[in-house]
Image: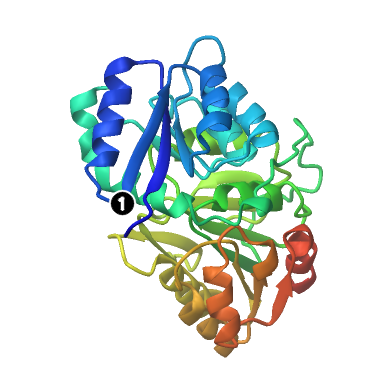
């Protein structure tokens, strides 16, 4: 490869900028073209150096990471991979993903430079994938605090199940969807996100302040309740099964190469014609086989339109295989899902 991925590293710790730079440049396809000590300096260097992607710390002086993201997305748009030890702060992880960063990667063991190499491949992969985003489709999600759950129904077994799949950049699209999907539907929802399990609890806690549905983590043995949207990382295998009392519940398994197919197929077998499958933005071709099973069992499938995706691969693959009953732009997904839920 003649052309290298050009990266700017923004972090206030000298040892960390060196550790990240060395880590990235150990890959022959990546070139670190500069470093910056805070968000303000980073913004200036983005305009000067025109990197393909930046890594960004959150806890920095002068201009912190969140302030920097806001300015960068308006003044000098570039794909951002957050690399921070502040993953346990829900307001920070949620806000960064809401504002449109490509991913939020937890620094291993805080900010210990020798430990960061544990995550080397993940970080390198994120940098390369970040350069391929359809950047004009990355937008901050506008949210309103305390919009409440006036339509949230009392805990009961859901009549229908919405299963949602996505991958990188999915949290941003998912936040937008779940702040628009009407509450009070006779359904539960479950989504697999490409998000670190370390970040998930804080993300869910913060998301609950804005979503009209209750947001919870999908856990082994947890019984599905109406009006709840369950989230889990696609680093795990999640299936829907029945408890000994005949209640729909989650079963957690070992990681699999096709977590969306695994979830979708199990949902189709459990809820049959009352299953609604949804594919959002993402790379790869996972989910198409699961969509086929949903259709075979009488359920319905929806794909986000290729034109509105940050990564079109997931939805494009399912559409080309004729596994999609309905295609909707991101702005119309919530209405499309509601229209297919069995009343």
Q: Residue furthest left?
A: 114
Does 80 sit left or right of 119 as displayed? right
- Displayed quadrant of residue 185: bottom right
Between 21 and 146, the one nearer to me in the picture: 21
Does 319 sit left or right of 81 as displayed? right
Q: Is residue 223 visible?
A: no
Mark 1, residue position = 29
Q: How is the image coloured?
A: rainbow
Does 237 sit left or right of 292 as displayed? left
- Residue 75's spot in the image, x, y percent? 68, 32
Between 125 and 187, the one nearer to me in the picture: 125
- Residue 268's spot in the image, x, y percent? 53, 78
Where 173 falls versus 187 (above or below)? above
Could you tell me which residue is drawn at 46 percent across and 65 percent down?
Answer: 245
In what quadrant of the picture does the C terminus appear?
bottom right
Between 26 and 145, the one nearer to me in the picture: 26
Few, some or many C-alpha atoms within 10 Å of disc 1 (few <14, some 14-19, many ≥20)?
A: some
In what quadrant of the picture does the N terminus appear?
bottom left
- Displayed quadrant of residue 307: bottom right
Q: Is residue 281 visible?
A: yes
């Amino acid at each position: 490869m003649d052309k290298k991925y050009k990266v700017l590293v923004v972090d206030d710790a000298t040892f960390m900028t060196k550790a990240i730079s060395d880590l990235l440049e150990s890959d022959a396809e990546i070139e670190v073209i500069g470093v910056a000590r805070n968000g303000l300096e980073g913004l200036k260097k983005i305009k000067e150096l025109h990197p393909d992607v930046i890594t960004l710390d959150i806890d920095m002086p002068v201009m912190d990471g969140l302030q920097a993201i806001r300015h960068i997305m308006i003044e000098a748009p570039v794909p951002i991979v957050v690399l921070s030890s502040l993953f346990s702060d829900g307001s920070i992880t949620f806000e960064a993903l809401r504002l449109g960063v490509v991913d939020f990667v937890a620094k291993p063991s805080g900010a210990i430079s020798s430990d960061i190499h544990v995550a080397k491949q993940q970080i390198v992969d994120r940098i390369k994938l970040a350069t391929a985003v359809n950047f004009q489709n990355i937008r901050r999600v506008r949210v309103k605090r305390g919009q409440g759950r006036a339509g949230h129904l009392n805990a009961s077994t859901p009549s229908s199940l919405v299963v949602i799949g996505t991958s990188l950049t999915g949290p941003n699209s998912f936040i937008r969807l779940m702040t628009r999907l009407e509450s009070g539907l006779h359904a539960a929802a479950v989504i697999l996100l490409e998000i670190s399990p370390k970040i998930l609890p804080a993300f869910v806690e913060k998301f609950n302040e804005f979503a009209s549905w209750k947001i919870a983590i999908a856990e082994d043995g947890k019984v599905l309740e109406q009006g709840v949207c369950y989230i889990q990382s696609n680093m795990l295998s999640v299936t829907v099964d029945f408890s000994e009392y005949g209640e729909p519940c989650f079963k957690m398994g070992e990681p699999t190469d096709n977590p969306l197919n695994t979830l979708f197929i199990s949902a189709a077998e459990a809820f049959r014609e009352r299953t609604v499958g949804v594919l959002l933005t993402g790379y790869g071709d996972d989910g198409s086989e699961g969509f086929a099973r949903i259709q075979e069992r009488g359920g319905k499938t929806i794909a986000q339109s290729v034109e509105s995706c940050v990564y079109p691969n997931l939805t494009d693959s399912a559409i080309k295989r004729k596994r999609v009953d309905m295609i909707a732009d991101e702005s119309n997904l919530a209405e499309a899902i509601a229209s297919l839920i069995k009343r």
